[in-house]
Amino acid sequence: MRIAIIGAGMCGLTTAWNLQKKGHDVTIFEKESIPGGLASGFREPQWENYVEKFYHHWFKTDTALMQLMKELDLFPEVEFKKPTTVMFYNGKFYPFDSIPAAILYPGLGYGINKIRFGFIGLYLKLTKNWKSLEKFTAESWMTKYAGAAVYHSMWEPMMVGKFGEQYAHQVNMAWLWARIYSRTTQLGTYRGGMQSFFSAFTAKLRERGVNILFNSAIRSVSKNGEIDLIVETEDQTSHFDRVIITTSPKSFLDLVPEITGSYRDQLQSLKSIGAVVLVVSLKRPLSPKDYYWYNLPKNAGFPFLALVEHTNFVPSSKFHGETIIYAGDYLESEHEYFSLSERDLLQRFIPGFQKINPEFSADWILNCWKFSTYYAQPIPFLNHSANIPDVKTPIRGLYFASMSHIYPWDRGTNYSVELANLLSSVI
């Protein structure tokens, strides 16, 4: 069959890989000039490595992704390390990436709170019955079983930071289970950065005969009778037997106005939140203790949810000696951060850098880059599995796969690979 895939992110590329192995004629359309989607990166002339526009890493438990890496013969380029994650409590930062660290973390209190935290963490690591958990909000379930003190100290700041006050108290427990169940303290990356991986992946696809068209924004996808589908760009109109769209739900509906009825209603009911990330290069390290990931509660006055010192994971020698940090937040689409220039946003963030390191000075800053997206985190309400649309749309031969389909798992390239494997099996 002639198959079109719209989007050269991880799901689109993996689906193309799977389908070309079956002997299909595959064309990928990508509106950007590079592959990778939200995991794509950029590189300054003096840098050896790429930097992701939105921070990305892999986990030891990412089995679908690691299997694909081995199939692509790229697994030797994967590196795993164990950088330090810290929590903010009462004006100080405390490591929180091991059992001993959790025992010493004062934010959980003492005695029964830490015992309950330990037992609940163990239960969530062992159970696979996530369907029963989606009947409850994370707040109600954690408050009942882990205790109110543990929830308000440990999980509530993350939930509010991730989903905002409007949605944090409505997110179901299956989503939080997935984060605890699947994640590891060892984090992985690709030598040279994620963009190096996507470049290697696209090269292998082209070697296999996959046609990849960059700078090819799609105007529309439509039916052509009962036989084939038409994909229209600014430059050409092409006919295909199957079309797979890997965009956000909103973009999908914009591309395919013929989709009506309950399927359109289902997609329009899905809610999500956006993200704004500022990448900053510095003359010297920000962290005084080589910390990598800072979890920052909104009620502590930080102007961002998380700060990530990338060069405490990938050495600064890969970036011409520069320190690379990310400051990011999940935000509703109307938030002013989306409209601020990168320099204006930087001025908003500088006080936050100074809270992390009081010695920080604006003259440490070499450069900054702002990246934003309105579709960064789907919001899973109670019994959310019933809200996930089928990858098969009402239009014959047209399929849709998005970040919203990977529930209960949180965003991640590993789950994009799993989704691609599912798509490939039903086409």
Image (cartoon, helix red, strand yellow):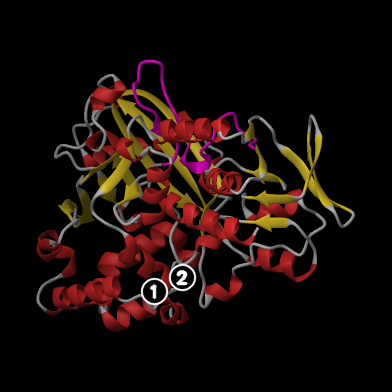
Asked if one can make out residue 351 in the rendered structure from this viewpoint, the answer is: no
Q: Nearer the viewer, residue 414 or 50?
A: 414
Q: Is residue 52 left or right of residue 286?
A: right
Comparing 215 with 323, the one in front is 215
Residue positioned most to the front: 23
Front residue of 280 and 246: 246
Q: Is residue 406 magenta?
A: no
Task: Name the residue at 27% across, 78% down.
Answer: 148
Say which amino acid is labelled 2: Val
> Residue, x 11% and y 65% (percent of image)?
103
Query: Which residue in the protein does label 2 denote?
Result: 171
User: Is residue 295 visible in this depiction of the protein?
Assistant: yes
Instruction: Kindly identify the residue that appears in the image at 10 percent across and 61 percent down.
Output: 100
Check residue 41 for magenta coloring.
Answer: yes
Question: For this rendering, which residue is in front, 96 or 9?
Answer: 9
Could you tell me residue 419's position as x and y percent? 52, 57
Identify the element where label 1 is drawn.
helix
Q: Quadrant of residue 96?
A: bottom left
User: How far is the residue under mark 1 from the one under mark 2?
Assistant: 6 Å
For disc 1, the marked residue is 138
The magenta stretch spans which residues?
Answer: 29-54
Residue type at mark 1: give it.
Ala
